[in-house]
Each structure stands twice: as C-alpha cells, then as structure tokens.
Amino acid sequence: MDFFKGIFEYTFINHALIASLFSSVICGILGSYIVSKRMVFISGGITHASFGGIGMAFYLGLPPFVGAAVFAVLSAFGIEWISKKGNVRNDSSIGILWSLGMAIGIIFIYITPGFTPNLMSYLFGSILTVSTGELVFMGILALVIALFFILFYHPILFVSFDENFAKAQKAPVRLINYSLMLLIALGIVINIRVAGIILVMSMLTLPQNTANLFSNNFKQIILYSILISFAGTMAGLAGSFWLGIPSGASIIFTLTLIFFMGKVLKILIERLKRKQKQFLPVK
Amino acid sequence: MNKQLVNIKNVTIGYQSKKVLDSVNMQVNKTDFIGVIGPNGGGKTTLIKSILGLIPIWEGSIDVNIRKSKIGYLPQFNPFDKAFPISVEEVILSGLSGKKHLFKRVNKTDKEHTEVLMKQAGIIHLRSKAIGQLSGGQIQRTLLCRALISKPELLILDEPSTFVDSQFEGELFEWLAELNKQIAIIMVSHDIGTISSHVKTIACVNGHLHYHKSNKITAEQLAHYECPIQIITHGEVPHQVLATHKH
C-alpha cells in the first residue's frame, strides 16, 4: 500500500507516473514502426552514439540532454544517409557509429575535470528524478508523434512496407523517412532518462513484440504496445519501490515477463483452437 | 489520334561500369500491348525501371507524357518483408500513395474501388488478412490490384505469371485484354509461348532492343537475337522471316 499512498504524497512519484505515461505513448508508437521495419539495431546505434553527446556536454558544461539530442539526430540522419548513398554495409555503419559515440563519450568524461555527477543515471536511467522541464518536453514530443502518425498513417505504412514501389509512385519517401528518423532520435534521447542508454532498446521492442503475438494490424500493434508499455512500467516501478532495486532494470524485467506470459498464452490459445477443431461434428 | 505515352530516345543505361542497355529506342502509345522478351540479364527489368525513373540513365532521354502516379507497376520480385503488419486491403490502397495523397486521406470511393478490384481478382475473402499469411499466387493477385487502383493509363507488369496458378493466368489475360481497350500495357516475360498469343507487338531486349510490329515469333528471329527459345508452345511455329537487323 505504501506505493499507492506514495503516488499522492510525493511529487517524484507523481512525476514518474506522468513520465511513464508519456514514455509509453512515445515508445509504443515509435517502437511499432521500428519493429515492423526491422530497425531495432539502428535505434540501438542511435542510442549509444548519443552517449558521445552526453560526454561532450559534460565537458563543455552544457545540459547533457542537449548534447545527447544533437548526437542522436546527427547519427540518425547519418545512418539513413550512409545506407542510401554510401558503399558501406548498413549494419557495419551502425556498428561504427555505435562504438564511436561511446568512445567520444568516454574520452570527454575522462578529460572533464572533477567528478561527473549522474553518469550512472544516463547509463541505467532514473525515472524518479525526471524534472518538470523534461516532463513538459516529453509531453510535447508524445503529442507531436501521436499527431504525425494519425495524420500520415497511410503514407508511413505504405512507404515502410515497400519503399521501391512508393518511389516509383513519386511518393515523398525521403521526407517521410527523415521525419521519422528525427522523431526516433528525439524519442530515444528523452527515454534515456527513463530507462537509460543500455536499456532503452527494450522499451522499443518488448511491448511491440508482445502486441505482435496477438495482432498483425499496424494500428492495433501501436495501441496494444502503448497499453502493455504503460502497464509494464507501472508494475516495474512498483516492483522497484517494494524490492529497492533500480527502476530502469525493474521495468525491463517486468516487460520481459509480460512478453513470456503473452507467448505462453498464445500457445495455449492455439492448442485450444486445435482441440475445438478436432471435436467438430463430422458431416 | 494515337496518344504517345512514353518516348525512349537513344537510351544507354548501366550499373557501375557495365553497360546493360545500348542506345535503345522505343515508343509506347495508347492501347499498345507490348511484350518484352529476352534472356536473363538482357536488360528487361532495367528498361522498365528506367521508364519508372527508378534508375538514372547514362545517355539519351525518356519522355513520359503522363503523371508518374498514372503508371501502374507490378514488380518482378517481392522485395518486401513478409512479416510486415499490413493487410491485403491496405497493400492495395498503397497503390494510391502518389504525391497528391500525402494530405488526402483514403476515402469511401477508394475503398469501394478496392473492393471491386478484390472481387475481380478473387481475393475479397482475404481482405483483412496480413500479407504474410498469403500464398505466392494470392500475393501476386494483391500486387496486381495495387498496380490498378490508381486507374493507370500505362500498366507495367514484370513477370506477372510467376507464382500464379494456371486458372488465374487465363483470367488474368482476359482481364488484361479488357483493360487494354483503354490503357497501354507493357509486359515482361520470358515465357514466350504465353506472351505471343496475347500481346500485340514484341520488343526483344538483349543489350539492344528489337521491336516487331507483330506478335509472331519465328525460330530464326529468336536465334538471331540470342533470345531463349525453350518455351514455345504454339505447335507449329509460323514461318515468317523478317528483314535482318543491322546491329
């Protein structure tokens, strides 16, 4: 009961609740796109490359969030550009940006004089320390992403399904791809505050794959992902509160648990269906 | 007057440093039905992609006198992801993703048109199925509907009978003949036997392009252009010798 009392008593839990709602909307929508388009490792690359921006911001005395955003957007566009224009393999270019970003981050944090505060919270996330300013940004981003997907649902679906065909039809393929890369980069950076660099990828893949177990419809996958994401984040937060473990890891663990429960449920449903078929009356 | 839709003038195309098509000339007019034949690697698909503006041309020019969104296209391979969460109906509607439709939402007329096409192709019962759950033939029918949804003035089919069962192949050619009263069709195929009884004219592509204002194929012709001759099913090959080409 302490957790539920805490919801109303402490602002930090209040903030955490609102943050997880916004984060569920952002990750639910973007993750469905990322999973459907098999871009999980692209988003992993963007996430890790943004660590370079965090390190540089520490060194220059800027807000780490700004540095991360700049690096994330640049690497997102870089990956999109290289995969179309360059002669480098797509997965290789992701690997290069991934480790280069981390290396830049480590170098700058090393040469920054004195102690670097909150470094761990960027690596592993800390939803309980989200500030009001960050909450406002999260809310705006969640709204922009939701509107973008509602307004351009069909073009997004069509371009990501068959890019070559869309190009042959003179659909604005590049505009749509780059806009989505921009939203993904910003979405990842803001969610680093919630789950941390190392764990944010699972927020973009676990709820979506759970949803995909029960639906093959893009719209439904988005809606289910948001719900699963929110439920998982809530349960994970409660777990971290009760057990005294880090919130980011607790959330990811809960989301994984939900995925496996979904998988078992699906197997059971399929068995039941097969049995029902067996007992159908013979004509 | 027969309206000219596409005019290909002295076009040379290649990939990296390898030349695939060499000074090709071809015109596509309204109500044409051109069968494009030739060996694998001869440049059939390259020719089609250049008309669609998907690959850059080295020399020459291609004038397309209709809007790009008025070209219906059925690609040869299915390069898309079979696990992608998209339904048959949505795939067909994606044939409308031309420029003007970015802010224009899918409306009732579009949906009704989709229904008509699905009925004609015999896939209406699959409308809300995910594309990955379909057989090869059903996917091909879906993609043909996608090529037709924009009410094209030119229909380009790259190996349309791959995966299609023989029953639908018959229906397909009847459907194409009906469409051909209004629109031009370019059909790529290496199945010469099937193609020659349905098309009006034949273009043989093998680095160069040879155009015949008839749908008769002779064995001499095929040997001359190094075209594949393994699939001729007409029984007696009509002996019609055309004038030799100067390369």
Image (cartoon, coloured by chain):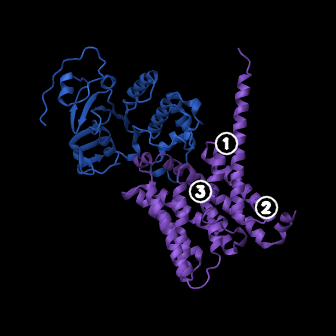
Chain colours: A purple, B blue
The image position of residue A114, as x and y in percent, is: 60, 85
- Label 1 CA crowd tier, 10 Å (few <14, some 14–19, many 20+): some
Where is A108 relative to B131, above or below? below
Report which residue position mark 2 lands on. A238
Q: Residue at x 44, y 27 (%)?
A: B164
Residue B32 x/y as whole percent = 30, 32
Q: Are marks 1 and 2 in contact (CB under 8 Å)?
A: no
First in sequence, mark 1 or 2: give its number: 1
Where is residue B45 drawn, in percent x and y? 32, 40
What residue type is disc 2 on?
Answer: Ala
Name the residue type under label 1. Phe
**Label placed on residue A157:** none
Q: Earlier in the sequence, mark 3 or mark 2?
A: 3
Chain to which mark 3 belongs = A
Say whether residue B13 is left or right of residue A224.
left
Residue B191 relative to residue A207: left or right: left
- Dot 1 lies on which element? helix
Q: Which residue is mark 3?
A: A30
Residue name at image x 27 percent, y 29 percent = B201
